[in-house]
Amino acid sequence: MILGALVIIVVGVLVVNYFKDQESQGLLPEATTENQTETAEVGKTYTVSKGDNLWKIAENAYGSGYNWVDIAEANNLTSPDMLNEGQELSIPDVEPKLATVSSIMDESSPDTISGATYEVQKGDNLWDISVRAYGDGYKWVEVATANNLTNPDLIFSGNILVLPR
């Protein structure tokens, strides 16, 4: 028992010393403020840094990543995933888009879905069904999961969907 405790203490000391040596040799990354990326500001241009994507840039500029679409449109980006380091982007002056749950849904509205099931109509998609059922389009994932949909883009008229409540 004493030998076991001694081995644990020795290993602990070796591990602590190892990491202390690594840090003093500069092998571990240190947090520095020198390499901070520039801040995206509305109405100005922004230079893309390594690791940036439109969502991060929009969060930085507007406080909401949902404005990435506005940045893509303002810069005529055909492939928003293909940003290059050093690329200059115009940050348009638009209102921040915030994710919200509709608080104005009226249960008596003919478009509102209040039941536990729903029959899919021509032109429906999970986003619109979720907005009508819950007031929140992002609930489409729950609807897809509850219905074991392998491809949520493929729903057909006449399908009966379970709406988890």
Image (cartoon, rainbow, N blue to C red):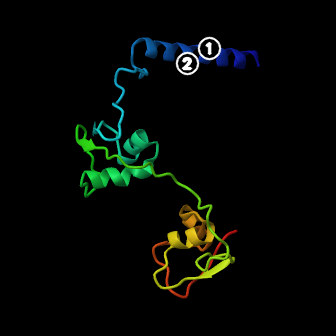
In percent of width and height, residue 102 lies at 59, 62
Q: Which residue type carries mark 1?
A: Val
Q: Position of residue 120 (x, y in %)?
A: 55, 83
Q: Is residue 88 visible?
A: yes
Q: Residues within 10 Å of mark 1 (few under 14, many from 20)?
A: few
Q: Please tell me whether residue 157 is drawn above or below residue 74 in the rendered image.
A: below
Name the front one of labels 2 and 1.
2
Label 2 crowd (10 A; few <14 / some 14-19 / many >=20): few
Quarter of the image where the N terminus is located: top right
Q: Is residue 40 above or below residue 80?
A: above
* Residue 10's disc number: 1
User: What residue lies at 41% left-to-right and 23% top-to-bottom?
Assistant: 29
Say which quarter of the image contains residue 148. bottom right
Q: Residue furthest right?
A: 1
User: Residue at point 40% right, 20% down?
Assistant: 32
Marks 2 and 1, how far apart in space? 9 Å
102 relative to 38, above or below: below
Amino acid at dot 2: Val
Please say whether residue 144 is visible from this viewpoint: no
Q: Residue at the spot x=59%, y=70% of the render?
A: 143
Looking at the rendering, which quadrant does residue 87 occupy?
A: top left
Q: Residue at x 46, y 12 (%)?
A: 21
* Residue 157 in the figure: left or right of residue 8: left
- Vertical comparison of 42 with 66: above or below: above
